[in-house]
Image: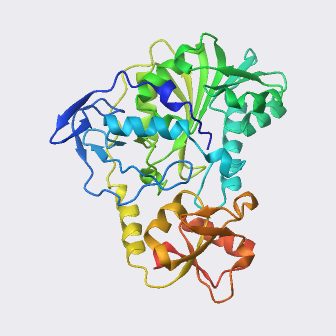
Amino acid sequence: MNLFPMLVSILGYQNLAVSAVGSRIISEKCLVCGGDDLKPASWQPQYFVTSDALASDFTPVLLVCDECGAIQKDLSPSYIAWTKNLYQNYRVRQLSDQTGVSDASPPLKIHAREDSILRLVKNIIRPDHTNLLEVGFGNGSLLRRIKNEFPSLVLAGLEVSDGHRNTLERLGINFIHGEIGSLKKTFDIVIVNNVLEHACDPLDFLLACGRCLGLGGRLIIALPNVKCATYDVIIADHVIHTNAQHVAFLAQKAQFSTLFLDDQTIPDQTLVALELTMDPGAPDLPFQPRTNENQVIKKIEHKLQNVNEEFVVFGSTIAACWAARYLKEKLLFLIDEDETRVGLIVEGKEVRAPEDVLPHQKILFLGHKDSLASIRLRLNISERLMHIDDL
């Protein structure tokens, strides 16, 4: 996940509309459709985690838009201040060279997402395209792969933290220190990989991306798909929780037309390619989801609250950190296939290698069931690996 401590300053809070409700402040407008019928979700998680896979010390409020079905965090002043502090002290690069997190194996998931973005670049690049910008380039792995695939492209990465300069300069890629809203340069292609979900004003962010593109320029966006990304809503600093229709709607409001939209290749991600146009037409309001996406994670929370035996948890990032807060003494330790995470401490529990699990110890898997078969085959732990749904 290409996340970075630039988000607070580049996303901007000047356009937030808030009003007093009781003793707290809630957002007036839906960040997706602009509707004013926002209500607290019927279910609010007991615990949250941060996008750098740590327990959140702030408990945000989930709001649901009755008009388009989008879910967002309550943009109270305390929430905004908390996110600002979080990004100033972002720890993901201290934990691992991987800048993303997943339910199971971070390197595998990051590679799959980068594969999809690379294929998309190949499909939308034109012969006259000469340069490309990635907003929030993380550890530079995607830009490194793009450089290998498209050696004639002039590449650049944008961050507000100057500490990332050496990462790109070692790759021979241009580093731009600043904010996307004040960027004066223009590019043929801009990539925003798992950043938009942090935007307190996603429309303003997309408009800023448009100003970095010439007419006919292409924008590639990847972000969690709330319909399938089970743990997205419990990530405290993910401001908006959207499906593919929400993203297409926002893009059209920002004067982009949709070239490609995919929410199937990577089940918990929405991947979209856009082109900057003068008049994409009036957007249709996104379909309201037929079911409340919170119900899946609500059931998982209930199961975790009622666990009465000891488990080892497979994974050590977002889902595992969240589950550890419920399991407490029922959690023996965590295991992770990512060697760089072995030895870390998550919620007071050690991260170990899969081979450290004893024959009698049960392993709890929190991710999608469709990943079970490959994990069981890869690690030869079929009889001990239990899915959260089976509790």
- The answer to whether residue 276 of the structure is visible from this angle is no
Residue at image coords 49%, 77%: 329
How is the protein colored in the picture? rainbow
Relative to the observer, which residue lies in front, 345 or 112?
345
Q: Identify the residue at the far left of this view.
A: 22
Q: Quadrant of the C terminus?
A: bottom left
Give the quarter of the image for residue 130: top right
Give the quarter of the image for residue 20: top left
Give the quarter of the image for residue 42: bottom left
Q: Quadrant of the N terminus?
A: top right
Residue at image coords 35%, 42%: 73
Residue at image coords 62%, 47%: 92
Relative to the observer, which residue lies in front, 129 or 318?
318
Q: Identify the residue at the far bottom of this view.
A: 360
x, y percent for residue 278: 48, 11
x, y percent for residue 274: 55, 26
Indicate whether 212 appears above or below 258.
above
x, y percent for residue 189: 65, 22
Q: Is residue 70 left or right of residue 199?
A: left
x, y percent for residue 28: 24, 32
Residue at image coords 52%, 61%: 321
